[in-house]
Amino acid sequence: MTANFFEFQAKLRKPRSAAQPNVTGEETAVSVSELTAQITRVINTGMPAAVLVRGELSNVNRNKSSGHLYFTLKDSEACIECVMFRSEAMRLKFQPEDGMEILAAGRIGVYPQRGRYQLYANTIRPLGQGALELAFQQVRRKLEAEGLFAAERKKPLPAYPLRIVVVTSREAAALHDILKVLRRFAWMRIMIYPVPVQGDGAGLKIAAALQHLNATIPTRGGADVILLARGGGSLEDLWSFNEEVVARAIVASHLPVVSGIGHEVDVSIADLVADHHAHTPTEAAQVVTAQWRGAADHLDGAGRRLARVLGTMLSDLTQRLRAIERHEAFRRPTDRVNMLRQLLDDRQRSLRVAEDRMLRDATDRIQSAMTRLGGFFPRVLSRFREMLGDFRQRLDQRFAIRLRSARDQLARSETMVQEHHPRLRVRLAGQKLDMAEIRVANASRRNVRGRIQQIDALARQLDAVSPQSVLRRGYTMTTRKKDGLPLRSASQVKPGDKLTTRFADGQVESIVEDSKQLSLFD
């Protein structure tokens, strides 16, 4: 079959001779589809059903919608287009990259729509290292670049956990090792979430278990820590814990995750992203319960420290109490009361002095206001009277204008009535005019009365605050006789000045005497 393929190639390479088809139509031409079908049959019969090709990857492209993987295999002299369908591409443990040297197994076929042959790959594996080892390094580099291995991202473990969830296989030997450690602490609540830890789809189920725990555990009493464990095995056996979906589920967990996977030499991606990495399942259980093992000693130490602190506090308080008992206030309590009584007397005297000062100031302000009002009131009253006279004059003028206007309108109406003889309308118009005159007169009188009342009220208010009214209430006003200057202070007069003191019913004159000169009649 292989020889037939090479014979076919040799025939294609021979120069064309006189045996070429007659383009005049003497021989029947084939269509492009028929020619492609013939080439496909030759390739299918001339090539083995499965080939193994070695080459360098380039133009690697995974279609996002279909999931098919397209790439080119090349060496120094030739290249071939390759395709790997979604069902086979999903089983790849590593991510194909340009420049990677691989072995691809599959079959050679023709893609009729593009008119080219290509390799339909079933499996590919890298050269130089295993596929799982390469996939492990790729996932590790990707997650490390995102900072998922950083220590500052990881959550601290609870010191004294009471509720622990163990995520592992029910048949795993690791579960028995973990329970052997945890059963020493009878007060702890242990929950087991069984998951497959090996085989296809195990990684997805482990990730789903972590997501389910974080979503449902808070509604069922809560948990303190998740213990993710598995016994030892080969890289293939432990591969479920190297999948990216498991790593991201651990990172997204709200509960701290302790990993104990494999033996001491085994390190998985799950160990690198876990909040704490234990080398074995037994060590993971010991890490979780480390603080509980020394809890009794911690309690004894805390009790001793508390007793010392309480003793010190009691001694300090006793000394403070004795110092308070020796204080002067407790030895002679009446001294404090007497001191407060004296302070109260001082405050009362201060208040009386302040009250007298405020009263004098208010009296001075009132006298000053009265003096100013004595000269201001007549002018204000005269001004109001002038305003009232002007208002009455304007009101009379407007009333006269309206009256003349009404009479003119009445005259025009009478003329119109006389022209058209509507006696009834004339009589009604006359009645309306009379009523209007009455309303206008009433309104004018009410307006005048209201204005007069307002002016009277203002006059009464001004009279109430006038100096004469203040004098009638018992006050007096003193001025110097020679210039009529109102006196507000004793410093304004000197001995020998004649003063005039005005009362409500008259005035008297007096002469200022020197207070330092002895009186002849004393």
Image (cartoon, rainbow, N blue to C red):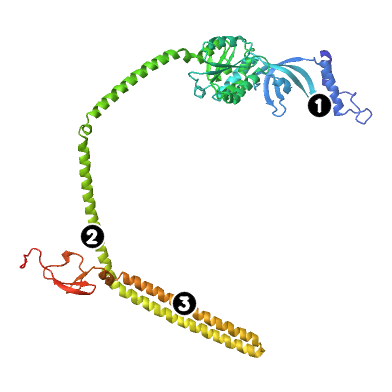
Q: Read off the residue under disc 1.
A: 112
Q: Nearer the viewer, mark 2 or mark 1?
A: 2
**Left-right relation of 461 to 39:** left
Chain-order first, disc 3 or disc 2: 2
Q: How far separated are the C-alphas under marks 3 and 2?
A: 48 Å
Q: Percent position (x, y) of residue 47?
A: 80, 16
Q: Is residue 146 left or right of residue 23?
A: left
Viewer-closest of 501 and 144: 501
User: What amino acid type should be assigned to the residue bearing mark 1?
Assistant: Pro
Q: What is the three-letter code of the residue carrying label 3?
A: Arg
Residue 148 spot, x, y in % from top left: 55, 23
Distance of label 3 from label 1 (alpha carbons): 115 Å
Q: Position of residue 253 (x, y in %)?
A: 57, 24
Label 2 sits on residue: 360
- Whether residue 455 can be seen here: yes
The residue positioned farthest toward the bottom in the image shown: 418
Query: Which element carries disc 2, helix, strand or loop?
Result: helix
- Farthest front residue? 334
What is the CA distance from the residue labelled 2 to the residue labelled 1?
120 Å
